[in-house]
Image (cartoon, rainbow, N blue to C red):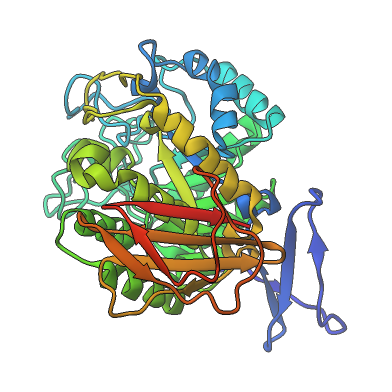
Amino acid sequence: MKQKLIITAFSLTIVFSCSQPEQKTEVVTKINDEIELVKSPPEWSKNSTIYEVNLRQYSHEGTIEAFRNDLGRIKELGIDILWFMPIHPIGEKNRKGTEGSYYSVKDYKQIHSAYGTIEDFKSLVSEAHKLGMHVILDWVANHTAFDNIWIEQGHDDWYTPDSNGNIQPPIGTDWWDVADLDYDNFEMRSAMIEAMKFWVTECDIDGYRCDVADWVPVDFWNEARRALDSIKPVFMLAEAENPELHEKAFDMSYAWEFHFIMNDVAQGNKSVKHIRDYLKGNAKRFEKDAYRLHFTSNHDENSWKGTVEERLGKSKKAFAVLAATIEGMPLIYNGQEGGLNKRLEFFEKDTIEWGDWSMSDFYTPLLNLNKENEALWNGNFGGDIRLLNPEKDTINLAYSREKGNSGVICLFNFSNQNSTVRIDFSGLSGRYTELYEKDTLNLNDSLIALQPWEFKLYQK
């Protein structure tokens, strides 16, 4: 549904500014004398990094308060955005496993009692804001639990019926623990938006990560974004890879395709050629201001596809650097910085085994570089990628990004053999220092030797 405002006869162009100085909400004049809001990402997101929080598995307590104790540590890691997986009560009807799926929501306006209270969550959000971080919630708009409060209130017509008139799971899935919502019902749409507004108004959250966003009509997301931005500027992440979602609703989308390419290259099923092809194709498919989310793990990949060690092995650090230095925003899944090396159970309590903090020493300079080096910022705020090595090279990748006085040069050997990469440094100048080893790059040296799965990340 589009909500438009008719311009009066004398009005041609109007520009509104929200109460928050960091965010501009523009109104664009249309040929037919109608105007509509055009979203833009909050100013604070331009150089942000993101951390996914699985409260159930984060600590033995599995509570908001237990997580709150680590806010300072996570801030020092270089994190700006905390994404909380669903914190709502979980359905009991048709429940999978003992604890159930986080994505089987029983009540959109409540917090699972095992995690704490709404007051606990408000305090956490407030403390995160004081540390300069922002908080987004995972939102499940496509389906609910079969014992969701809406069904108990008699709103069966808000759901998709099967041939017998019974509420059914999303068609084509084995998600028999959740009930599919019907977006042809506009009363349901209104209730969903009110529930989304609730957390922004009551807890001052900063946006949403929206589950299976492509399964929900785009016009709903457009309407929801307008409603949320009327409260405060929000940041919206889509679990989808659809350029249309960026037009009016979402600031960032999943780079699923690139994630799968990384897995395949690590396992010898694809080569650097596929990385090059992706980078070129992504630049054509998505507008420059569309942020892309890059990751080597998340809750789905960890539980269902395997740990970083299983999927990436010896290449895990090289791909983490790649994900943090190409155009887009890097994500860390809780535990990656502490040596998480097991598949966390999805429907059971299965606490993260924190241990190898050497990965924290690896991620901290990488994520802070992403925040501080303007060339690595998101969307239009960052620099373009320039490929530096020959296309015929199928095992090495070299590229630079520059913006203002900042820049990076990234070199990778994506193979299990020693290699020498030939690099064209023409047009590049300045002093480049390696992030970890601190050596200086000689821009007159066109041949650089790399060990198997080795990377070099030089910053200016």
Report the front residue among 410 and 218.
Answer: 410
Report the front residue among 55 and 270.
Answer: 270
Q: Quadrant of residue 35?
A: bottom right
Question: Against 64, is 341 above or below?
Answer: below
Q: Quadrant of residue 343?
A: top left
Q: At 54% across and 28% down in the image, what residue appears? A: 74
Residue 85 drawn at (x, y percent): 41, 34
Residue 329 drawn at (x, y percent): 50, 53
Q: At 53% across and 55% down in the image, what residue appears? A: 458
Q: Is residue 346 visible?
A: yes
Specify the quadrant that holds the C terminus: bottom right
Question: Against 448, is 198 above or below?
Answer: above
Q: At 71% across and 28% down in the image, what residue appears? A: 130
Question: Against 449, is 146 above or below?
Answer: above
Q: Residue furthest top?
A: 61
Q: Is residue 375 left or right of residue 175?
A: right
Q: At 67% across and 26% down in the image, what residue appears? A: 126
Q: Residue furthest bottom?
A: 31
Residue 110 drawn at (x, y percent): 47, 25
Q: Residue furthest right?
A: 10
Residue 108 drawn at (x, y percent): 44, 34
Report the front residue among 35 and 455.
Answer: 455
Q: How many marks?
A: 0
Q: Is residue 452 left or right of residue 390?
A: left
Q: Is residue 198 visible?
A: no
